[in-house]
Image (cartoon, grey):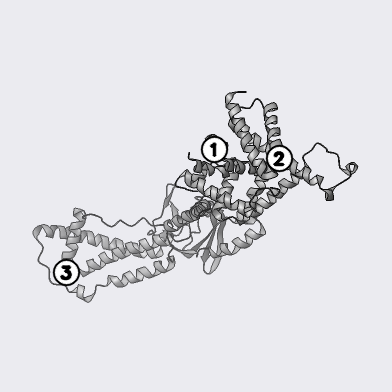
């Protein structure tokens, strides 16, 4: 180390900053350099002061906190527990918002779509008078005859189904058939081909086909309605002759004496209220808190009234745990109260018609 | 006495004499240097390394100069006091030395408050016990020589802010 460099070690002597090598170099130089020796001797008072830990601490305190660079402050901020938790909560919230389906107004969908589909079932004038099709080939004729028979059967079934749907309980219907992703199956292709060929000659068949699609659409709409933001799943069950209950798909006709009950499963924890209305008289069926995933039968024992006539079952579900809210303090109740009232879902109204 | 130790003490005497002469005058400096070396020879004969002898000599010289200056002050005619009225020493820390230390600390705090950011940071690191190599990393200096230079300038600035010397009596 050069002598001029050694002199620069002077500032480290009193504070004890020097390493053994630096200290040896400084003393070696001081022994032969009077000005450096004088400076070191003058540092002795400061060295003695700084050798006292208490005095050192006081001086450090007087210097204040060390300045931190912006990046270090930013890093420090995000690595603290609270911002970390908040960021994690925000991410989780965003994921939940993305994943949760947005509820749609169920009643409007259920009422409007059939009407629209009925209108759509009337073929437009342009479609009613297409250009005449070529006479079917012999092979196609066979298919057409078979399909005509099938169509006749289908027509009667559809008529029954649609009339039954209007009267039947609105239970969770079977999921609609998924749209074909690939090429249609040979039979379906043949059916479509035949339908296309028969369109000018058989407008009724076309209407039935469209009506069938309309029925599927209605059932899908009803399924949507069942999935509305009630946060529940529900379906009706009817007791068979064997004594077992079978799930109703929503198109069955109910008759007086049918042993029917409603089954509800809570997707979230919440309070379920079920009411039956008949001839303008409302009668409570059940009010109960359901845990997440809990299934409840309504009525809890026995079946719904099965006298002939029309009645409605109304279900409303309010997510949240009222008991937990009650157990918490006044402030919490004050906060949760309005929330509870606002999250109450619109009641789901289901019509049951028992025929003679 | 080993030859190495003798060489160190010889060089030390020369340095101490010059230093004391600049502070208290040539006549008293001779006595002070002699007393210091006598003490190192009699009481600290076991110390041979330069790293031990030099700091020790700084301490001895400092106390002797301080004592000399106090004695001279007491001898002043206007400061004369009856010996019966002087308090007896209690064996505890020297109250005057304590007061001087507190005064130095106070002045140091005031001077540090006037330092710029880098010098304050440098002094903070030193008080925290960091070595120059660690300070180089903390302050992201290109080389350790840069840190030496920064510290040298900061010490100079601090000394200026304290009126040119750490202790007032000097």
Is residue A273 among what the camera can see? yes
Q: Secondary structure at mark 1?
A: helix
Q: Secondary structure at mark 3?
A: loop
* For residue B132, above or below residue A306: above
In this orientation, which residue lies closer to the viewer: A125 or B56? Answer: B56
Which residue is denoted by mark 1 in the rendering?
A29
Chain letter belonging to callout 1: A
In three-dimensional space, the C-alpha distance between marks 1 and 2, rounded to whole angstroms, equals 27 Å
- The x and y percentages for residue B79 are 83, 49
Other residues around mark 1 within 10 Å, as few (<14) / some (14–19) / many (≥20): some
- The x and y percentages for residue A186 are 18, 53
In this orientation, which residue lies closer to the viewer: A156 or A68? Answer: A68
Which residue reaches farthest front? B27
Identify the residue at image location x=39%, y=62%. A222
Which residue is denoted by mark 3 in the rendering?
A201
First along the sequence among labels 3 and 1:
1
Residue A327, by quadrant, is bottom right
Which residue is denoted by mark 2 in the rendering?
B27
* For residue A48, above or below residue B157: above
- The x and y percentages for residue A211 are 29, 66
Instruction: Report whether mark 3 lies on the same chain as mark 1.
Output: yes
In the image, which is nearer the foreground, mark 2 or mark 3? 2
């Amino acid at each position: 180390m050069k002598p001029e460099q050694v002199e620069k070690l002077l500032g480290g002597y009193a504070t004890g900053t020097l390493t053994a090598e630096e200290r040896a170099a400084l003393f070696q130089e001081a022994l032969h350099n009077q000005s450096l020796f004088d400076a070191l001797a003058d540092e002795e008072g400061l060295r003695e002061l700084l050798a006292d830990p208490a005095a050192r601490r006081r001086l450090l305190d007087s210097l204040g906190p060390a300045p931190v660079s912006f990046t270090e402050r930013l890093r420090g901020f995000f690595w603290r527990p609270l911002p970390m938790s908040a960021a994690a909560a925000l991410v989780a919230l965003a994921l939940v918002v993305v994943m949760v389906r947005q509820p749609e107004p169920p009643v409007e969908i259920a009422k409007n779509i059939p009407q629209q589909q009925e209108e759509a079932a009337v073929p437009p004038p342009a479609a009613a008078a297409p250009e005449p099709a070529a006479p079917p080939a012999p092979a196609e004729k066979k298919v057409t005859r078979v399909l005509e028979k099938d169509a006749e059967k289908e027509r009667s079934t559809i008529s029954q189904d649609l009339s039954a749907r209007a009267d039947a309980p609105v239970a969770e219907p079977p999921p609609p058939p998924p749209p074909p992703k690939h090429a249609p199956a040979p039979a379906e292709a043949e059916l479509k081909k035949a339908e296309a060929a028969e369109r000018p000659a058989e407008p009724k068949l076309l209407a039935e086909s469209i009506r069938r699609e309309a029925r599927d659409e209605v059932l899908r709409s009803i399924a949507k309605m069942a999935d509305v933001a009630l946060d529940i799943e529900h379906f009706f069950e009817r007791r068979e002759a064997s004594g077992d209950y079978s799930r109703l798909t929503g198109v069955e006709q109910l008759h007086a004496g049918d042993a029917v009950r409603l089954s509800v499963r809570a997707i979230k924890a919440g309070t379920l209220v079920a009411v039956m209305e008949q001839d303008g008289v409302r009668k409570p069926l059940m009010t109960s808190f359901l845990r997440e995933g809990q299934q409840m039968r309504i009525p809890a024992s026995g079946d719904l009234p099965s006298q002939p006539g029309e009645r409605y079952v109304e279900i409303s579900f309010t997510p949240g745990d009222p008991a937990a809210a009650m157990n918490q303090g006044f402030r919490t109740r004050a906060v949760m109260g309005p929330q509870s009232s606002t999250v109450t879902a619109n009641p789901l109204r289901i019509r049951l018609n028992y025929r003679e | 006495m080993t030859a190495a130790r003798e060489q160190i003490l010889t060089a030390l005497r020369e340095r101490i004499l010059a230093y004391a002469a600049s502070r208290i005058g040539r006549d008293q400096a001779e006595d002070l240097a002699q007393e210091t070396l006598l003490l190192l020879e009699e009481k600290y004969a076991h110390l041979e390394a330069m790293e031990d002898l030099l700091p020790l000599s700084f301490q001895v010289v400092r106390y002797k100069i301080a004592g000399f200056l106090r004695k001279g002050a007491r001898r002043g005619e206007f400061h004369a006091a009856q010996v019966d009225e002087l308090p007896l020493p209690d064996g505890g820390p020297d109250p005057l030395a304590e007061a001087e230390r507190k005064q130095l600390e106070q002045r140091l705090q005031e001077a540090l408050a006037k330092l710029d950011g880098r010098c304050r940071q440098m002094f903070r690191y030193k008080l925290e016990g960091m070595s120059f190599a660690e300070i180089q990393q903390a302050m992201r200096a290109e080389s350790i020589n840069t840190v030496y230079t920064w510290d040298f300038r900061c010490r100079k600035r601090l000394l200026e802010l304290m009126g040119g010397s750490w202790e007032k009596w000097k």
